[in-house]
């Protein structure tokens, strides 16, 4: 089991790096040098919503300092608009600008190309759903470890 666990962790890390490289290649293909792959994924995850930096961090996508830095850069390059919250002046709300929405749409086109290519591969929807289920179970396991600790999680699993 330990070898499988180590392999799963390594694979998750490698897949994340590969996907970031896929996004970088797409940005290069589009000639977009003023935004990087991580910023593009933050932008994509904001989507059509209006969020605070704290909400992005709380969703578990990014580390707080990285989000703040990347949001600042995307505002500077015109991908995001920001304003102070009317209810909490310390909080800044961000949303995609017209330029950000254009990049969001380009990423959707990239994902559609990926799905079309997947249709011609051995990876079918059922396989993808099974992988997603396994990753969600691993996420739940790690969340429980963080919430309840190793000993409590193991005791709870045995009960």
Image: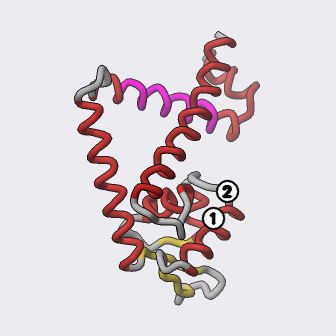
Q: Which residue is drawn at 28% across and 44% down?
A: 113
Q: What's drawn in magenta, residue-wise? A: 129-143
Name the mark on residue 63. Answer: 2
Circle 1: is it few (<14), some (14-19), or many (20+) Cα within 10 Å?
some
Res. 20 in view: yes
Q: Is residue 3 magenta?
A: no
Name the mark on residue 67. Answer: 1
Q: Does the magenta stretch include residue 135?
A: yes
Quarter of the image with the N terminus in it: top right
Q: Which residue is drawn at 29% across and 25% down?
A: 121
Is 86 situated above or below 136?
below
Q: Which secondary structure is most common in the magenta stretch?
A: helix
Q: What kind of element bears circle 1?
A: helix
Q: Which residue is drawn at 36% across and 56% down?
A: 107
Report which quarter residue 143 is drawn in. top right
Residue 30 location (% of width, % of height): 40, 60
Residue 112 location (% of width, % of height): 27, 47
Is 59 situated above or below 12?
below
Res. 140 in view: no
Q: What kind of element bears circle 2?
A: loop
Horizontal side of 141 relative to 118 (left or right) equals right
- The scheme the figure's colours follow is secondary structure
Q: How far apart are marks 2 and 1 (CA)?
A: 6 Å
Q: Which residue is drawn at 23% across and 30% down?
A: 119
Camera-nearest residue between 63 and 20: 20
Instruction: Tell me whether circle 2 and circle 1 mark residues in contact (CB < 8 Å).
Output: yes
């Amino acid at each position: 089991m330990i070898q499988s666990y180590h392999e799963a962790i390594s694979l998750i890390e490698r897949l994340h790096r590969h996907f970031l490289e896929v996004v970088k290649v797409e940005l290069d293909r589009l000639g977009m040098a003023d935004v990087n792959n991580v910023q593009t994924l933050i932008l994509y995850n904001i989507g059509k919503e209006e969020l605070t930096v704290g909400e992005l961090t709380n969703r578990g996508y990014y580390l707080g300092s990285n989000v703040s830095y990347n949001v600042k850069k995307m505002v500077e390059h015109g991908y995001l608009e920001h304003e102070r919250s009317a209810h909490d002046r310390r909080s800044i709300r961000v949303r995609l600008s017209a330029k950000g929405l254009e990049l969001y749409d380009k990423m959707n086109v990239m994902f559609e190309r990926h799905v079309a290519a997947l249709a011609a591969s051995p990876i079918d929807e059922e396989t993808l759903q099974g992988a997603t289920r396994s990753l969600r179970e691993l996420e739940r396991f790690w969340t429980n470890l963080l919430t309840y600790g190793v000993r409590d999680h193991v005791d709870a699993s045995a009960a």
